Image (cartoon, grey):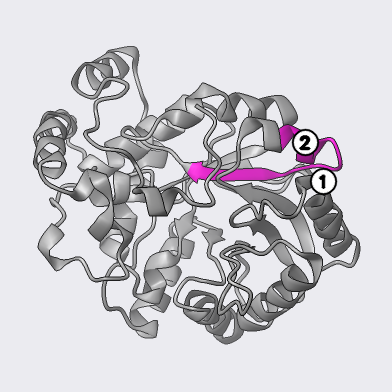
Amino acid sequence: MKHRKLLLDGTMVSEIGLGCMSLSGFYGVTTEKEAHETLAFCLDQGVNFLDTANIYGDGISEAIIGNYLKQTAVEFVIATKGGISRNSKDGRRFDNRPEYLRTELEASLKRLNLETVDLFYIHRRDLEVEIEDVMESLLAFKTEGKIRGIGFSEISPTSLRRAAAIGPVDAVQSEYSLWTRSPELGLIQACNELGASFVPFSPVGRGILTDKVPNIESFTDQDLRKTNPRFQQPNFANNVTRVAAFKELAADLNLSTATLALAWVLDQAEHLIPIPGTRSATHAAQFIKASGFKMTSEIRNNIDGVLPVGWAYGDRYSENQWIGVERYA
C-alpha cells in the first residue's frame, strides 16, 4: 500500500483509507465482530487510516473502533467529525459553538479510547458561527492536545481560505467520484494551494460504481440513498445503463468496477486520499487493489469516453440533503 501526506506536520497514511459509516449498520445490518474482522483485514493489508463521525450510529461506529483499539493496541490514524446537532432543544441542525464542539469531541475521544484524535473535522458549517471563530475553537483543542489536525467537511473554497487565514487547515472532506466532480471547480485546487489534503468520500458513488447494482427496493429509511435523486427512477435506471460501459472497461482490465473507480480518483492528484466505506473485508480487498494499479493515458481516455464530466442523471443531493453543504459551483 502506497502512502500520502494527510496532515501538515508530515503524518503519512495509506493512500486509501476506510470510511467507517458502514460499521454502524448505516447501509445494512452488521455486527461488531464483522466490523473488527474488516478492521483487522484492512490493517493487515496496509490500510492505517480510519474515518468516522460521532453521528454514525449515534456513536456506534466510534465505539466499535474504540473497542478494537482497546482489545488489540494497534495504531490507526483516526479522523472523526463533530458539529451536527443531536437532540438539540433550540432547533439547531448544526452547532459549531465552542462549548458544543468541546462536549462532542470529549465524548468522541472517550468512545474511541483515545486521549488525542489525529484529525477532527467540522462535519457541517453552522452559519450562526463565523468560520474564523470556529477555527479559534479548533486551535484551542489543538493547543490542549485533544486533536492533532484540523479539518472541514463539505465547505467551499472561499470558506477554506477564510479558515486558513486564521490557522493551518490540514484536510477537507467532500464527495468526489466519477459521478460527482464539482470539487474540480475550485476545492481540489484550493486544498493544493494551501497544502491541505483533500479526502473524497463516497468515491465509488454510494455503490453505483461497483460490480453489484444497488437494490433500491431494499434501502432502509436511514439510508440517504432512499431519497437521493440519483437513486430515484427514472434517474437510477439511466445511471445503471451509463455505468454498464464502465463495468465492461474494468472487466477488460481484469479489475472490479470499484477498483477502477478508485484508481481513477487516486490518479487525479497526489493530495487526494479517498475513504471508501464498507463493512466487508471482501469489498475492502477490491478497494485496496486500486493502490497498486498503474493508470495510463489510454485508460484515462477510455474512462473519459464512457463517463464524461456531467454524465450522471439527477442531483447529488435532495433539497433537504443539501442543507448544511456549502454550494460554490
Calculate the distance from the C-alpha at mark 2 to the C-alpha at mark 1: 7 Å
Q: Which percent across, then down, holds residue 228?
A: 28, 51
Q: Name the residue under label 2.
A: 162
- Pick the front one: 249 or 25: 25
Q: Which percent across, then down, holds residue 203?
A: 38, 43
Residue 4 visible to the viewer: yes
2 and 1 marks in contact (CB < 8 Å): yes
**Which label number is shown at residue 132?**
1
Is 228 displayed left or right of 125 in the figure? left
Quadrant of the image occupied by residue 122: bottom right
Is 139 displayed left or right of 104 in the figure? right
Q: Is residue 203 above or below residue 110?
A: above
**Which label number is shown at residue 278?**
none
Q: What stretch is highlighted in magenta?
A: 160-174
Residue 162 sits inside the magenta stretch? yes
Which residue: 60% across, 67% down?
A: 92
Say what amino acid the circle numbered 1 marks.
Glu
Is 120 displayed left or right of 33 in the figure? right
Q: Residue furthest front?
A: 90
